Image (cartoon, grey):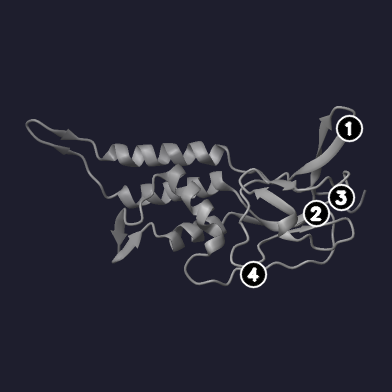
Amino acid sequence: MSTGSGTITAITAVGYRASMVDLLLTLRGLTNAGSAEYTVNAVSYWTDAQMQDVLDRHVSQIRHEDLSPIAKVGVGSIGYFDYQSSRRFFETSSGGTARFIVQDETGATVGSAAYSVDYPRGLVTFGTDTAGQTRYVTGFSYDMNAAAADVWAQKASHYVTAYDVSTDKHDLKRSQIIDNCLKMSREYAAGAQVFSVSIGRSDD
C-alpha cells in the first residue's frame, strides 16, 4: 500500500448512509435480522442504523492501496481493464459522497465515469485499456463475517431470558434459539479477518 494525500468523506451521518444500502442488505441476509425482531427498553432491533453501527465497528479505512491489474489476453494482444483489491465489501459512493476513490499513477483522481465497481468483490473495471498502469483505491472495506458474528452474539444475549416450555402435547425448546445464535456467531467469527503486527527488539 502506498502513502500519499487523498481524503474521503468522514463518517458523520445520522441514521444510515445511502452508500451502505447494499452492505446492510447483505448483513441482514447473513443474520436473518428483521427491522423489528425484538424490543429492548422500548427500542426495536434491528433497524438500518443499528446494523450500520455494527458494520462501522468492523471497518478498515483503506488509503492508496495499489490495485493488482489483471491481464486480458486476446488474439495477439494483451489489455488491462480489471483491477483487483485485496479487500472486499467496500462502501459505495452515493449521492456525490466520496466514500470510494480511484487514483492514477500520478495521484490524480479518476472520474467515476471511467470505471465500474463490483464493491463486494473489490473489483474495479475500466472502460478503456489502462496499459497496466498503476491504479490506487481509497475507501472503506467492511469485515462482513465479523459483523455477522457480532449480530448473532447480540441476538443470543437477548434470548438468554427465554425458557423451555413443556405441556401435555407440546415441548418448546426455546433454549435452542440461544444455541443456534451462538453457533452462527462462531461460524462467522471463524471466517473473520485476522490481523497481525510485527514486533522487533530494539537491542538487535
Q: Given contact means CB atoms under 8 Å apart, are the residues at marks 2 and 3 in contact?
A: yes
> In terms of secondary structure, where does tag 1 sit?
strand
**Which residue: 6% across, 31% down?**
168
The earlier-in-sequence mark between 1 and 4 is 4
Mark 2 crowd level (few <14, some 14–19, many ≥20, 10 Å Cα): many
> In terms of secondary structure, where does tag 2 sit?
strand
Mark 3 crowd level (few <14, some 14–19, many ≥20, 10 Å Cα): some
User: Can residue 61 be seen in the rendering of this structure?
Assistant: no
Q: Residue furthest right?
A: 204
Residues under labels 4 and 2: Cα distance?
19 Å
Kindly identify the amino acid type of the residue bearing the numbered disc 1.
Ser
**Which residue: 52% across, 50% down?**
147
Kindly identify the amino acid type of the residue bearing the numbered disc 4.
Ala
The earlier-in-sequence mark between 4 and 2 is 4
The residue singled out by tag 4 in the image is: 10
The earlier-in-sequence mark between 1 and 3 is 1
Q: Quarter-wise, where is residue 180 in the image?
A: top left
Residues under labels 1 and 4: Cα distance?
42 Å
